[in-house]
Amino acid sequence: MKGVNAMNTVLPVFEVERNMFYRHKASLMYDYRAIGLAFTLVEIPFLILASMVFVVLWYFTVGFAMNAGKFFLYWLFMFLSLAVFTFLGQGFMAVFPDSQTAQGFGSILIGMSGIFGGILIRPQFIPPFWEWGYWLFPLHYVLEGLFISQFQGDNTTIVASYGSPFFSAVCPDVGPGDPIPSNCTGTAEEWIHVSFG
């Protein structure tokens, strides 16, 4: 995931900048608001460029839709993903004493995002006690945005596998003992809505 790289690469850079900020703040040269705004404004052009390079190289390689609206929507979600993880990395670096500790807590965030983002455990199967994790960690929003930006309006036929949530959605009348129909199909758009709904 590109956001993980963004978080890990910003930590050592921000550690050096943070130490510089403490020196200048002690001599009453900088206010924390000014330096925070400066860090944010300096990151934005880099995030725009990095996300655009990644999306241009990735988007056409995997054969996504040749549609300008879908391309820029995909780029927007990739940009937001990089921004969220970059600024979370800066936040961890501002809170913790060194980059190793910040990276440790960043790894916890990334691991929890992987668990609750809908990759390892589908959203429908997350136990009720842990549903807060699905809504709290950022990966689920990134994946939802990236997938929906591509498959909204996609009428590609998908054959539903028996027992899957998609099968239950497109063939709701088939019970456990009933024969499985051979034409139980849906579209890619329906699959995305069942998966992230």
Image (cartoon, grey):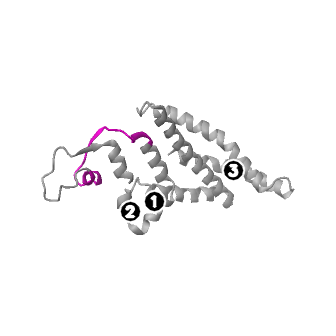
Chain-order first, disc 3 or disc 1? 3
As drawn, which residue projects farthest toward the bottom? Answer: 129
The residues bearing labels 3 and 1 have C-alpha atoms spaced at a distance of: 29 Å
The x and y percentages for residue 180 are: 15, 50
Q: Does the stretch in magenta take in 193?
A: no
Residue to which mark 1 is pinned? 134
Q: Which mark is residue 14?
A: 3
The x and y percentages for residue 57 are: 50, 32
Residue drawn at (56%, 34%), measured in percent from left and top? Answer: 53
Q: Amino acid at mark 1?
A: Tyr
CB-based contact (under 8 Å), mark 3 and mark 1: no
Residue to which mark 2 is pinned? 126
Relative side of 27 to 3, left or right: right
- Between label 3 and label 1, give the one nearer the viewer: 1
Over which residues does the magenta segment extend?
A: 149-169
The residues bearing labels 1 and 2 have C-alpha atoms spaced at a distance of: 8 Å
Q: Is residue 7 visible?
A: no
The x and y percentages for residue 187 are: 30, 42
Q: Does the stretch in magenta take in 168?
A: yes
